[in-house]
Image: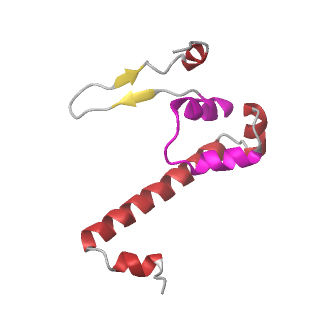
């Protein structure tokens, strides 16, 4: 007989259950963040899709991504009229701006 996911999770050690809950909350927050960001830019999924040359379904999927290419992230942000900066933070150290991804378009023409 099949066991539900909820029932299975209840059989796991409490530390594992807490880790699963933390990750679920993180994933939900990330998904909301993209939607909130797009709405804050007063941009609908349809408008953003037209700007990026994709369909609305693609934008919906992007908003649910937990992990994506930097180029996808940059396109998404630029499609809303913004720009993307990647900053590394370290305890008791100055912020470090990562410049490696600034010209990803130029890399598209390079064949490796």
In the image, residue 77 sits, relative to residue 37, either above or below, namely above
Which residue appears farthest toward the front when viewing the image? 1
**Magenta stretch secondary structure, dominant:** helix
State whether residue 44 appears in this view: no
Count of numbered circles on the image: 0
State whether residue 48 appears in this view: yes
Is residue 5 or residue 75 the one in the foreground? 5
Magenta-span inclusion, residue 100 = no
Magenta-span inclusion, residue 73 = yes
Which colour assignment does the render follow? secondary structure
Segment colored magenta: 56-82
Q: Residue at x 68, y 44 (%)?
A: 59
Percent x, y of residue 85: 48, 26
Residue 24 vs residue 47: left or right? left
Percent x, y of residue 67: 49, 44
Q: Residue at x 26, y 73 (%)?
A: 14
Is residue 57 or residue 28 the one in the foreground? 57
Percent x, y of residue 73: 56, 35
In the image, residue 33 sits, relative to residue 99, either above or below, namely below
Which residue appears farthest toward the bottom when viewing the image? 1
Q: Quadrant of residue 47?
A: top right
Percent x, y of residue 23: 40, 59
Q: Residue at x 46, y 75 (%)?
A: 5
Residue 67 vs residue 43: left or right? left
Q: Residue at x 46, y 82 (%)?
A: 3
Is residue 98 or residue 61 the one in the foreground? 61
């Amino acid at each position: 007989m099949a066991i539900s996911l909820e029932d299975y999770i209840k059989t796991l050690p409490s530390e594992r259950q807490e880790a699963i809950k933390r990750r679920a909350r993180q994933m939900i927050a990330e998904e909301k963040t993209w939607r909130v960001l797009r709405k804050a830019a007063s941009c609908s999924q349809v408008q953003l899709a037209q700007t990026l040359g994709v369909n609305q379904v693609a934008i919906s999927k992007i908003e649910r991504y937990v992990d994506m290419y930097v180029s996808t992230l940059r396109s998404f942000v630029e499609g809303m009229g913004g720009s993307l900066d990647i900053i590394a933070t370290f305890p008791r150290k100055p912020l470090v701006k990562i410049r490696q991804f600034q010209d990803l378009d130029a890399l598209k023409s390079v064949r490796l």
